[in-house]
Amino acid sequence: MTFEIRLQRARCIGSKCCTHAAPGVFALDDNLTVTIIDPAGGTLEEVQLAADECPTATISVVVEGSA
Ligand code: SF4
């Protein structure tokens, strides 16, 4: 299933929930702010879990055809 990941990086507090949920997709940069290392590096379920577990709603997932 095709999906798009959107980040509001200014919200990120570096809690690393996302990097645990989808380590192939998300990493933290030198400023401890989330970045996407590979948008295809994880499953939709992993990315959705990362979005759900993010305490600051930095990550949103748009599934193609659903929005
Ligand atoms: S879970 Fe949210 S706040 Fe934590 S590092 Fe990831 S994007 Fe940033």
Image (spheres, rainbow, N blue to C red):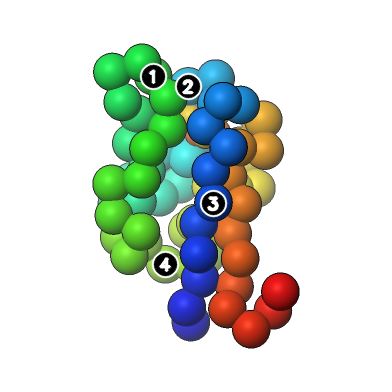
Question: Disc 1 versus disc 4: distance between alpha carbons?
Answer: 23 Å
Asked if ligand 1 lies within 8 A of label 1, the reply is yes
> Which residue bears the numbered disc 1?
32
Question: Disc 3 versus disc 1: distance between alpha carbons?
Answer: 18 Å
Asked if ligand 1 lies within 8 A of label 2, the reply is yes
Q: Nearer the viewer, mark 4 or mark 3?
A: 3
Question: Do the numbered discs 1 and 2 sit on residues whose CB atoms are within 8 Å?
Answer: yes
- Look at the numbered disc 2 and give the secondary structure of its residue: loop
Q: Nearer the viewer, mark 2 or mark 3?
A: 3
Amino acid at pointer 2: Gly
Q: Nearer the viewer, mark 1 or mark 4?
A: 1
Image position, residue 34 (x, y; %): 42, 32
Left or right relative to 6: residue 21: left
Which comes before the other along the chain, label 1 or label 4?
A: 1
> Which residue bears the numbered disc 4?
43
Q: Which mark is residue 14?
A: 2
Image position, residue 17 (x, y; %): 50, 34
- Look at the numbered disc 1 and give the secondary structure of its residue: loop
Q: Residues within 10 Å of mark 4 (few under 14, many from 20)?
A: some
Left or right relative to 48: residue 67: right
Q: Is residue 20 above or below residue 10?
A: below
Q: Which mark is residue 6?
A: 3
Residue at screen point 42% across, 67% down: 43
Question: Disc 4 versus disc 3: distance between alpha carbons?
Answer: 15 Å
In the picture, which quadrant includes the C terminus?
bottom right
- Look at the numbered disc 3 and give the secondary structure of its residue: strand
Single out the residue that lies furthest toward the right.
Answer: 67
Q: Nearer the viewer, mark 3 or mark 1?
A: 3
